[in-house]
């Protein structure tokens, strides 16, 4: 009980001994006072992560279509964008934020936090996870896509794809009266993504946690007769640069730090994780 509450309680006790207020009336006053004090304590002790948010206008129209990565004539990552002329190299400085130890499965929301800090927002990954990441602790249609299934604070959490992070980003930006918005780049060619980067916009992109790992797909029953093919070793990071010679990309990776990967591997894993990408601009 804080000092103000103690003073209030003592006031009621003194009234009992030093005033002529009838006992029944005084008892009612004391009872009401105790209720108000208890309510105040309950409100002050409410955990911050009970906050819920909704977004009215999410700029996400891309579905997750596993069949696209199985197509024999798939050319998303090799498409020749004749109208796009890229410089030999380009990079921007995006702050690296480790997802560990607090968010062992929170690479997606940590990547978003990296980009928000790049744009000057003073925000941390746990605040974003507690207040803006759409989550579900049970499976239903939309899990993994519109919602993070499980908890990013848990080593047994799973993950989510771009629609959930776009919702988180746009809700935060709207709450902060920002003119910026999150937009889907999913299913764009790698050249298109590189071109967007050259405009000064870091790209949140899905890739593999371990570049030596084989990606396999687990069909998960999400209810209503629907299944979702969840890819193993799913990971999310921020593309901050590329160099066409010697063919590398630079990533602000919530697990590994600022690292380089080959464009060939980067393109391959972009494909294997359903071509998921988004930009804030």
Image (spheres, grey):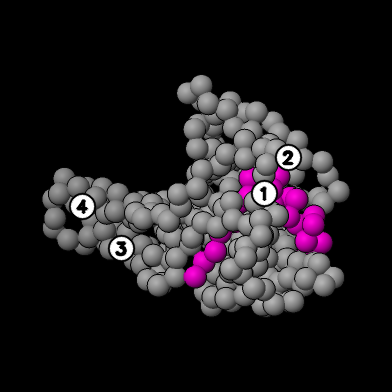
Alpha carbon distance from label 1 to label 2: 23 Å
Verify whether residue 113 appears in magenta. no
Identify the secondary structure beneath mark 2. loop
List the residue tagged with mark 3. 8
Quadrant hosting residue 9: bottom left
Quadrant hosting residue 196: bottom right
- Sequence-earlier tag: 3 or 2: 3
When the figure is inspected, residue 44 is found, relative to residue 66, above or below; the finding is below
Alpha carbon distance from label 1 to label 3: 72 Å
- Sequence-earlier tag: 4 or 2: 4
List the residue tagged with mark 2. 232
List the residue tagged with mark 4. 29
In the picture provided, is 90 more to the left or to the right than 245? Answer: left
Identify the secondary structure beneath mark 4. helix
- Across and down, in percent, residue 38 comes to 36, 51
When the figure is inspected, residue 209 is found, relative to residue 225, above or below; the finding is below
Residue at position x 63%, y 57% in the image: 189
Alpha carbon distance from label 4 to label 2: 62 Å
Task: Classify mark 2: residues with Cα within 10 Å, few (<14), some (14-19) or many (20+).
Answer: some
In the picture provided, is 146 more to the left or to the right than 99? Answer: left
* Nearest the eye: 63 or 181: 63
Which residues are the magenta region?
256-281
List the residue tagged with mark 1. 75
Disc 1 versus disc 2: nearer the observer: 1
């Amino acid at each position: 009980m804080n000092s103000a509450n103690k003073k209030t309680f003592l006031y009621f006790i003194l009234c009992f001994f030093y005033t002529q207020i009838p006992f029944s009336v005084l008892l009612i006053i004391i009872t009401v006072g105790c209720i108000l004090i208890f309510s105040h304590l309950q409100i002050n002790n409410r955990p911050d992560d009970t906050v819920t948010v909704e977004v009215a206008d999410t700029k996400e129209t891309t579905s997750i279509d596993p069949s696209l990565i199985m197509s024999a004539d798939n050319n998303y990552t090799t498409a020749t964008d004749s109208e796009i002329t890229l410089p030999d190299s380009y990079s921007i400085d995006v702050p690296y934020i480790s997802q560990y130890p607090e968010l062992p499965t929170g690479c997606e929301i940590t990547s978003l936090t990296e980009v928000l800090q790049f744009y000057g927002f003073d925000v941390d990954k746990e605040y974003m996870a507690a207040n803006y990441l759409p989550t579900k602790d049970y499976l239903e249609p939309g899990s993994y896509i519109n919602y993070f299934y499980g908890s990013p604070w848990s080593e047994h959490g799973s993950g989510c794809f771009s629609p959930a992070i776009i919702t988180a980003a746009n809700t935060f930006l709207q709450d902060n009266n920002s003119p910026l918005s999150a937009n889907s780049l999913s299913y764009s060619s790698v050249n298109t993504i590189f071109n967007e980067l050259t405009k000064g916009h870091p790209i949140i992109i899905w890739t593999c946690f371990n570049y030596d790992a084989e990606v396999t797909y687990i069909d998960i029953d999400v209810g209503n007769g629907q299944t979702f093919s969840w890819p193993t070793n799913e990971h999310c990071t921020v593309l901050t640069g590329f160099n066409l010679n010697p063919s590398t990309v630079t990533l602000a990776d919530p697990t590994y730090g600022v690292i380089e990967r080959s464009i060939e591997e980067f393109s391959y894993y972009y494909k294997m994780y359903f071509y998921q990408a988004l930009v804030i601009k």
